[in-house]
Image (cartoon, rainbow, N blue to C red):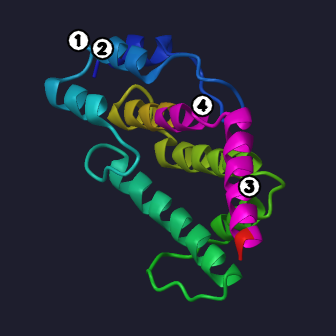
Amino acid sequence: MASYYYLLSSLPDLSANEEMPITYDEFVLMCEGNVTGKKYELLKELSLDMTEGPVLSKWSEFFNNLTGEINSQRSAALGKSYQAEYDKDPVNTMIAQAAIGAKTPLEGEKLLLEREFEALDDITCGHYYDDVCLFGYAIKLKLLERQSCFVKEKGQAEFKRLFDTVQQSVYNL
């Protein structure tokens, strides 16, 4: 853990409202030699749906509950029932409603990202220079990496392509 002091204090701050200051691969390279072999392997293989490791079980529980709320609200909007079990949380309910009702899918994703960062801050609160802090940072970086894949122009082009396909199908009826 002593080597975490330098590592964690040398990492740039992460914000849900800003671009990634470093890539996940750069982060993993910085961790090499500063974390144990097992933890390094966990960091190299980290995905947002993992459940084992520091922080990951609490993160997974939060993420599944948020996803459950979103799926439940989407199902209700379609007039269908949602059968999966999840713990309801009033903040998740409010954020899911706002995200689903956002003007664009990208705005909705940004609302969800802010909520995910808040949850990670709660999970890692009081942890400095330890595995909890390190893995919380890694998850945030993974979230930003996912967010960076959303390119407005590509999204609009895909929407137009899908809409044109639907229009053509309706026209052919």
Please state which amino acid type lies under the numbered disc 3.
Answer: Asp
Please say if the residues under marks 1 and 2 sit with CB atoms less than 8 Å apart: yes
Is residue 148 found left or right of 153 in the rendered image?
left
Which residue carries the number 2 mark? 3
Within-10-Å neighbours for mark 4: few <14, some 14–19, many 20+: few
Whole-Å distance between the Cαs marked 4 and 1?
Answer: 28 Å
Which residue carries the number 3 mark? 164
Which residue carries the number 4 mark? 148
Please state which amino acid type lies under the numbered disc 4.
Answer: Ser
Whole-Å distance between the Cαs marked 3 and 4?
Answer: 26 Å
Please say if the residues under marks 4 and 1 sit with CB atoms less than 8 Å apart: no
Q: Secondary structure at mark 2?
A: loop
Q: Secondary structure at mark 4?
A: helix
Quick one: quadrant of the N terminus?
top left
Whole-Å distance between the Cαs marked 1 and 2?
Answer: 9 Å
The x and y percentages for residue 89 are 60, 71
Please state which amino acid type lies under the numbered disc 1.
Answer: Gly
Write down the quadrant of residue 69 in the picture.
Answer: bottom right
Within-10-Å neighbours for mark 3: few <14, some 14–19, many 20+: few
- Give the label, 2 or 3, closer to the camera: 3
What is the magenta range?
142-171
